[in-house]
Amino acid sequence: MITSDATTSMRAGKLDETRLAAELQQALQATIFDSRLRIAPKRMHQIVQEVATAFRRFLEEHEHTDAAYTFGQYLADAGVGHRTLLALMDVFHHTCWESAATTTGRSPASVRYGTPLLAGYMARREANLLQEQERTRLALERARTRDTN
């Protein structure tokens, strides 16, 4: 999935955002129907660009984890499914794993980015599920009330 060109550009100390976006696009296309992605296919390119830009900003802005957490919430709201998110993370891992430019003696940037991104995504998905459950409970309650009257 990841080409050696993307890894080479990471080792050179810069993120090839165009190459990363192309690889993210492939991952998104591969999972768009598997993961019950709730986004329109025409929005796919826009989301890919947003994902690549968010990762680049994370690297440039000294790994601001709050931004990654917030972006994870945005992806949940945009309808990105969990399998799709994991496929996108796989692209980041393959791109960054051996890159000296993004590891600086610690875990790869993809791991440092992925943790708050996934935490934000999961928190928002949980909140959305709780809201949906509450709406369902209220609808059931209204239906029961109508049936008893």
Image (cartoon, grey):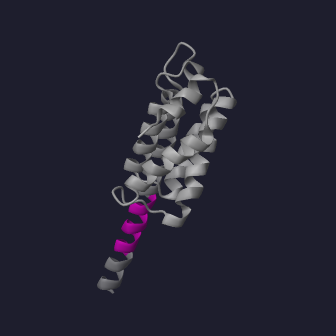
Can residue 115 be spotted in the picture?
no
Q: Is residue 42 left or right of residue 85?
A: right
Residue 105 visible here: yes
Quadrant of the image containing the C terminus: bottom left
Question: Residue placed at 35% from the left, 84% from the top?
Answer: 146
Q: Is residue 38 above or below residue 113?
A: below
Residue at the extreme top: 105
Give the image location of residue 113, x and y in percent.
54, 32
Q: Residue at x 56, y 41 (%)?
A: 19
Q: Which residue ends up furthest to the bottom in the rendered image?
A: 149
Would you say residue 16 sits in the magenta stretch? no
Q: Is residue 47 left or right of residue 142?
A: right
Residue farthest to the right, as pictured: 61
In the depicted structure, whether residue 79 falls above or below residue 107: below
Task: Give the image location of residue 115, x and y in percent.
Answer: 48, 32
Residue 132 on the magenta segment:
yes
Q: Quadrant of the N terminus?
A: top left
Main secondary-structure element of the magenta-colored stretch: helix
Residue 50 in the image, given as x and y percentages of width and height: 61, 49
Magenta extent: 131-141
Q: Nearer the viewer, residue 75 or 6?
A: 6
Q: Residue at x 49, y 20 (%)?
A: 107
Taking 61 as reference, is 33 left or right? left
Q: Residue furthest front?
A: 5
Q: Which residue is at a point 53% across and 47% down the rendered structure image?
A: 22
Q: Quadrant of residue 47 in the image?
A: bottom right
